[in-house]
Amino acid sequence: MISGSTQELRVADVMSGSVKTVTSETPTGKVLEIMEDNHVHALPVVDQDQCVGIVTATDLVRLIRETNAALRSGYPHYEDCLWAVDLAHRKLDQQPIREIMSVSVEKVSPDTPLCEAAKRLSSCSRHHLVVEEDGKLVGFLSSWDVAAAFC
């Protein structure tokens, strides 16, 4: 059961307001570094002050798995071709994030009731919502932020 005070919470009350972002041209390797350094699982992708997408750890894991699968199927002696593996990983590090980011972004305003935002996260099978006010990114809300608010 949700307490009365929790029902009154708004997205602005629990969102991360200081948000690290990347551009669509940021190399994948740099995105991984930013995520690791900031202990985050997703980053909004912002071009010209507009959120154009989101990149998640899941997107990056998928890319790495697909790259490794392609290498294994393309090189019968994969383990003997470390030069090919090194080349593929260097290319992977330099690939612009626009090639793997999600362009479908769920957005809410800071005034959205937290319960409504939680329902949106659940219904769209996402773990992050972009928080915008007047078309500008002002925060980021994760399912972990929502869970912490109810604990």
Image: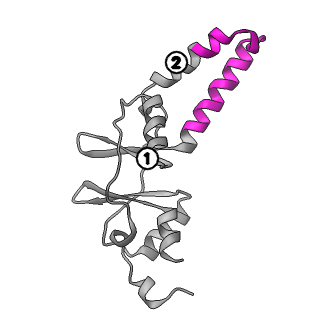
> Which quarter of the image is occupied by the C terminus?
bottom right
Coordinates of residue 30 in the picture (x, y in percent): 43, 31
Vertical order, 94 against 10 (above or below): above
Residue 102 shows in this picture: no
Going by the picture, which residue comes out furthest to the right? Answer: 76
Q: Residues within 10 Å of mark 2 (few under 14, many from 20)?
A: few
Q: Is residue 68 magenta?
A: yes
Which of the 4 image quadrants contains residue 72? Answer: top right
Q: Residues within 10 Å of mark 1 (few under 14, many from 20)?
A: few
Give the total number of marks visible in the rendering: 2
Q: Secondary structure at mark 2?
A: helix
Residue at (52, 63) in percent of width and height: 144
Q: Secondary structure at mark 1?
A: helix
Q: Relative to residue 83, is residue 28 drawn left or right? A: left
Residue under label 2, please give it.
Answer: 90
First to last magenta residue range: 60-86
Residue type, numbered disc 2: Arg
